[in-house]
Amino acid sequence: MIGRPSRRSVVTGAIVGAVAAIAGPPLRHTIASALSARTERRLNGVGETGPYPVSPAARDLHERLTVVDLHADSLLWGRDLLRRSDRGHLDLPRLLDGNVALQVFAMPTKVPRHLNIERNDDRTDDIRLVALVQGWPRATWGSLLARAEYQAGRLATMAAYSDGGLAIIRSATDLDALLARRAAGERVVGALLAIEGAHALDGDPANVDRLFDAGYRMVGLTHFFDNDVAGSAHGTAKGGLTATGRDLVGRLEARSILVDLAHASMATIDDVLAIATRPVVVSHTGVRGTADNVRNLADDQLRGVAATGGVVGIGFWPTACGGEDALSIARAIAHAVAVIGPEHVALGSDFDGAVPVPFDASGLALLTQALLTEGLDEVTIAAAMGGSAIELLRGCLPAN
């Protein structure tokens, strides 16, 4: 059961936040960089760092793939993602090294202190401390929607300064243009925005329009706690969709925003599958066939998502895949493929999501090699590594 934060942690957070709030820009930047670096090195571990040697066969196949990852939390850490870093799991140089065509960047707008996968409530808000330390605009200190809009702006700024290396994807037209550029030999990565938890709407479903205008094209209904639209797999009640949640699903579908069931309770998953009229996605998860825990999907849930035409992104961290190496991820993917077919299976790394992973984004060829070792054929590997996600997005994003 989640408890209240200790008096020491509250006092420490208040002091750090106050110093960050009143400091001038140089000092604030120094404080933010030091704290973010220390925290990220502790939370975003990598089993081994590159370069990552693979067999010639795996390298050849990997270079021919269109690789898509449906979930990374990299925006949260305050790094310039255009520059290669020695911490965290990804940045543009490492995405290019890993032959990633499209990366989904997710924004968690509120995270409880001492979070766990079993039971959390919404009384604490660690993202507020992040906002204070990193010097986010004052509006973000209290508004979750403002946090989402601020991070969308950061990503847009990075894309503008990337010399064409990072392209924001908001529509099917943008996606096709990205793929055409890559087919012509350009080194470019697409970036698509997602939200973790509809509490980012600040209690007003009409704010879907503001998320859309900011560029968000995927919305997770819940994150680590129950909210006013749905129950979380990690919440206290773990209920299903509320009346507000049912309304929200309709609004998301009407705006061609994908509904993401990652972190959703079993009741929420069942409720959404019963009313969905468009494909749904589970951006980052595992399968109970290889790692049986509350975070992961049972085979019936896999089939339910597939029945909508959706995809399931398999995660890279131990709770999701049941191990600490590329072969563990490959086995989870193989299980999902056996249950619902490769056309409904994708990658959902959770890079930079405060989880350990066996390799960073530059090492994705290790997963291609592991899938070959697991006995999957090239057509199946191509689908799971990105082909299925591309087809989903091409059919579900707004046309223009």
Image (tube, rainbow, N blue to C red):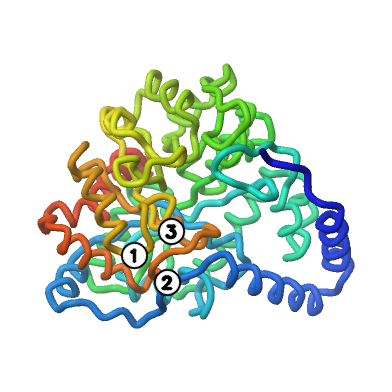
Residue at position x 29%, y 39% from top? 395
Nearer to me, 288 or 194 = 288
Nearer the camera: disc 1 or disc 3: 1
Nearer to me, 394 or 229 = 229
- Which amino acid, by three-letter code, is at mark 2? Gly
Callout 3 environment at 10 Å: few (<14), some (14 to 19), or many (20+)? many
**23 over 219 or under it: above or below:** below
- The mark nearer the N terminus, 1 or 2, is 2
Say what secondary structure mark 2 lies in: loop
Nearer the camera: disc 2 or disc 3: 2
**56 over 260 or under it: above or below:** below
Say what secondary structure mark 3 lies in: strand
Callout 1 environment at 10 Å: few (<14), some (14 to 19), or many (20+)? many
Nearer to me, 344 or 398 = 344
Q: CA distance from mark 1 to mark 3?
A: 26 Å
Is 17 placed left or right of 395 in the picture?
right
Classify residue 66 by image quadrant: bottom left
Which residue was labeled with disc 3?
A: 191
> x and y percent of residue 141 in the render?
78, 51
Residue at position x 37%, y 80% from top? 50
- Which amino acid, by three-letter code, is at mark 1? Asp
Which residue was labeled with disc 1?
A: 325
Disc ID at residue 47 = 2
Say what secondary structure mark 1 lies in: loop
Residue at position x 48%, y 26% from top? 268
- What is the quadrant of the C terminus in the image? top left
Callout 2 environment at 10 Å: few (<14), some (14 to 19), or many (20+)? few
Disc ID at residue 276 = none
> x and y percent of residue 128 in the render?
74, 52
